[in-house]
Image: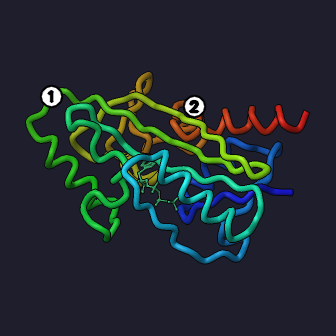
């Protein structure tokens, strides 16, 4: 049976589906008829990911996974990090979050940053976590119209353009999310064999 992906972020769904290909079917909260805005009250990606997967597992009793992701800027001591989605306040406008980050980085030459994804899987009533990291740097203007969140200002190591200038397939050659999902797939394959 398909595993529930406990997210309300359609961009995440598109990226994860692109990695999974035909091998594994997932269904979204929307497709499962679950309308809930899962709280993310904790101060780590790990704890928020667990909160999301356990919330959906309690509601459905089914295997499911969630992920919590954030952009960690070294010169800002890891900010916005776990607050990435609401850096500029609860309004969650991507552009406002980017504007605030660029403002906070004005005059800072050390622009290294990383994206980090933590997946929490509940499989046969046990929790497992998988992490994916993508190192890169922050540029000082927005470039590109693809993707979401901080994609227009993040250039991954090994590329010469931002995530927002890439197709989903191209982003998946570099991305934190892809690396975490690859581990999820490996784990599920092992369980099935
Ligand atoms: P959920 O329903 O899965 O919780 P969300 O959008 O609230 O969706 P998060 O709490 O994990 O997701 O917030 C992560 C934020 O970090 C997200 O809203 C983006 O602003 C940013 N982010 C995460 N992954 C990103 C990526 O691949 N590219 C750009 N920005 C990303």
Percent x, y for residue 91?
31, 71
Labels 1 and 2: the sequence-earlier one? 1
- The image quadrant that residue 63 belongs to is bottom right
Left or right for 75, reference 160: left
- The image quadrant that residue 138 belongs to is top left
Question: Tag 2: Cα neighbours inside 10 Å, few (<14), some, or many (≥20)?
Answer: few
Question: Tag 1: Cα neighbours inside 10 Å, few (<14), some, or many (≥20)?
Answer: few
Furthest residue toward right? 193
Left or right for 191, reference 81: right
Percent x, y for residue 140?
21, 40
Q: Which secondary structure, mark 2?
A: loop
Q: Is mark 2 within 8 Å of ligand 1?
A: no
Residue at figure coordinates x 73%, y 37% from the top left: 185
Residue at figure coordinates x 40%, y 28% from the top left: 135
Q: Is mark 1 within 8 Å of ligand 1?
A: no
- The image quadrant that residue 131 belongs to is top right
Q: Quadrant of ligand 1?
A: bottom left
2 shown above or below 23? below
Q: Residue beneath label 2, please?
A: 173
Q: Which secondary structure, mark 1?
A: loop
What is the number of the mark on residue 109?
1
127 shown above or below 2? above
Instruction: State the separation of the CA atoms marked 1 and 2.
Output: 27 Å
Furthest residue toward left? 107
Residue closest to the eye, 44 or 119: 44
Residue closest to the eye, 155 or 90: 90
In the rendered view of the protein, which quadrant contains the C terminus?
top right
What is the number of the mark on residue 121?
none
């Amino acid at each position: 049976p398909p595993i529930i992906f406990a997210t309300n972020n359609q961009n995440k769904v598109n990226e994860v589906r692109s990695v999974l290909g035909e091998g594994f079917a997932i269904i979204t909260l929307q497709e499962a008829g679950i309308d809930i805005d899962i709280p993310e009250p904790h101060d780590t990606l790990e704890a928020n990911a667990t909160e999301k997967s356990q919330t959906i597992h309690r509601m459905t009793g089914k295997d499911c996974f969630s992920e919590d992701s954030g952009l960690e800027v070294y010169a800002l001591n890891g900010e916005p990090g776990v607050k990435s989605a609401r850096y500029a306040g609860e309004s969650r406008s991507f552009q406002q979050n980017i504007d605030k980050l660029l403002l906070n980085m004005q005059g800072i030459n050390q622009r290294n940053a990383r994206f980090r994804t933590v997946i929490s899987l509940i499989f046969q009533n046990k929790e497992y976590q998988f992490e994916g990291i993508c190192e890169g740097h922050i540029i000082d203007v927005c470039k590109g119209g693809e993707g979401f969140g901080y994609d227009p200002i993040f250039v991954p190591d090994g590329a010469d353009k931002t995530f927002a200038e890439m197709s989903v397939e191209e982003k998946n050659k570099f991305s934190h999310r892809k690396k975490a999902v690859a581990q999820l797939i490996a784990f599920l394959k092992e369980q099935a064999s």
